[in-house]
Amino acid sequence: MITAQGITKQFGDITAVNNISFSIREGEITGLLGPNGAGKTTTLRMLTCYLKPDKGAISIGRYNVEDNPVEVRKIIGYLPESAPVYNDMLVYDYLSYIAEVRGTGQSKIAEMGSLCGINEVMHMNIGELSKGYKQRVGLAQAMIHDPEILVLDEPTSGLDPNQIIEIRNLIREIGKRKTIILSTHILPEVEATCDRVIIIDRGSIVADDRTENLQAKSEGEKQILVSVSGADYPALSRELSKLSGVTGVEEVAGSELVSARVTAGAAAEIRPDIFRMVSGKNWILYEMTQEHRSLERVFRELTGGMK
Amino acid sequence: MNFKDLNIQETFQRGRDRAMVYLHMPLAIMKKELMTYFYTPIAYIVITAFLIVTGFFFFKDFFYFNQAEMRGFFQFLPLVLTLVIPAITMRLFAEEIHSGTIETLMTLPVRTIEAVVGKFMAATAFVSFMLAPTLIYLVTIVIVGSPDPGPIIGGYLGSILLAGTYSAVGVLTSSLGRNQIIAFISGLAACFFLWLIDKITIFLPTKLGFIEYLGTDFHFRNISRGIIDSRDIIYFISIIVISILLTTKILDDRR
């Protein structure tokens, strides 16, 4: 559906995107993940024909972005970063304008209104809306022509937790029928919505795989957070290290309790041993949590956040 | 006979359909821009200020010379337009660049030139709308005397052409950056310069006298005398086309 080959974009001396290639199949929800300034937005802007790549080629559907930008734009719905909208227009007028340019009937406006939950603000000035509503208006704008491909740049930024869940559900729902590419730096979002992840760092792709494969990559080991009182860290560390299956202990600072993050082999179940050890020492166990943050680990390893 | 009539109608219809293919996007954009003008107070402020100033120039001469003509009005109109039109056009692209909506606009299935033409048409239509109330002056002089129709028809035709020219220049300066003030000042400077050119030829050697052909006021004066010459019309249209193409180029280079 979408193929990018060796695309590069420079702004002055800065290389925002450096020779990246990927392809996206029809009907997939792909997450473009990366730290701030990694080149996510630039990549999406090139896919939507807003920017021209300096090098490389992008083809979308049957069309080449270079030769047929207008045809490409017809099959794409795009929500730019922070959802820019005209502040001096009514929501209805704005959607009506988009519908006219997109060549869809005005009946789509009401449909989008209920889909994105903006019916109650339809006759308000866009400039007076909250961030969350503006984001939804932007989303309605992107979907009004029922596009084959939906490109969403940080669709949940600036929304409250309830809205985030609503928008994620909406994306999941639409993703059953459409190809969606979304960018984000929020990991749970990718785990919750995406079939596939492309991780970008400093303009290059560092990982490109299905979400579950990436999660599995770090499942060779697991981490358990242990917090106790009545002990000091060296003693806790010494005792934890003695347990079989433990490969590393790391201090977690910041609480009144003594806390340690224990790394162990994925196969070994060491939680009963920890409990017995702690109670044997007459310490009090306040917390013991097995962490399921595998994608975060992969992300931190790949994007250099991990020492 | 009947058959022939039908054919002409069909040809006309087909021509209109084809024109609509090209004009659909510019018209949609023009409609949106006009809607925005009248949704904000800008339109009403600009129109009111314009009518006060031009009304003064009309009635000043009207009572002084006691003649049924609109010469005073058309004499000062070009200068008034150099001030007013950049204020109308300044937001057209600068605002979109500033707020980031340009990204939405340029990812709609719209060619850059269609967006530029749409905005140009909106500004020109707005100025025409602003000129419409001045027809009351015309009604006034028709009631009190019998004015020569030539200068008046020529004057209005010239005004529309001049409005289009300044609008195109204003759209061009609006596409230069994200700052509306800069767009206004540079638009004003450019329009004022075009107005000024034919007045500076007196300081130049006679060999350079041809420079006056480059000024808007020279051509406007010709038309508003009631002489509708294709050279003057071609001048205005050339400036419009050049400005639109330059704006398209500037916006495309931003990519």
Image (spheres, coloured by chain):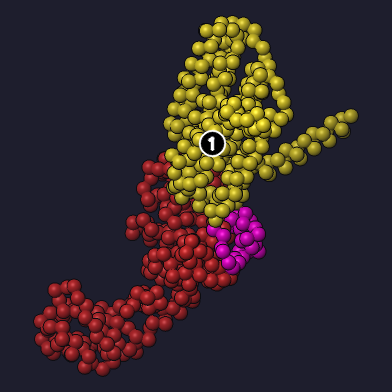
Residue A71, horizontal then vertical, whole percent: 63, 56
Compared to residue B95, the image places residue B148 above or below, namely above
Task: Quadrant for residue B245, please give it.
Answer: top right
Q: Residues within 10 Å of mark 1 (few under 14, many from 20)?
A: some
Residue at screen point 56% across, 63% down: A53
Looking at the image, the residue that sits furthest to the right is: B1
Callout 1: residue from which chain? B
Residue at screen point 51% across, 56% down: A78
Q: For this view, does A231 lie left or right of residue A246?
A: left
Viewer-side residue, B194 vs A261: B194
Residue at screen point 16% across, 79% down: A258
Viewer-side residue, B93 vs B83: B83
- Regarding residue A153, the answer to whether it shows in the image is yes
Q: Is residue A68 magenta?
A: yes
Q: Can you tell which chain is drawn yellow?
A: B
Q: Quadrant of the N terminus of chain A?
A: bottom right
Residue B162, horizontal then vertical, whole percent: 60, 29
Compared to residue B126, the image places residue A162 above or below, namely below
Which residues make up the magenta segment?
A51-76
The colour chain A appears in is: red
Residue B86, horizontal then vertical, whole percent: 50, 34
Disc 1 element: helix
Viewer-side residue, A49 vs B224: B224
Residue at screen point 63% across, 41% down: B242
- Label 1, on which residue? B190
Amino acid at the residue labelled 1: Ala
Compared to residue A25, the image places residue A270 above or below, namely below
Q: Quadrant of the C terminus of chain A?
A: bottom left
- Regarding residue A210, the answer to whether it shows in the image is no
Q: For this view, does A277 lie left or right of residue A84?
A: left
Q: Is residue A211 magenta?
A: no
Residue A291, horizontal then vertical, whole percent: 30, 78
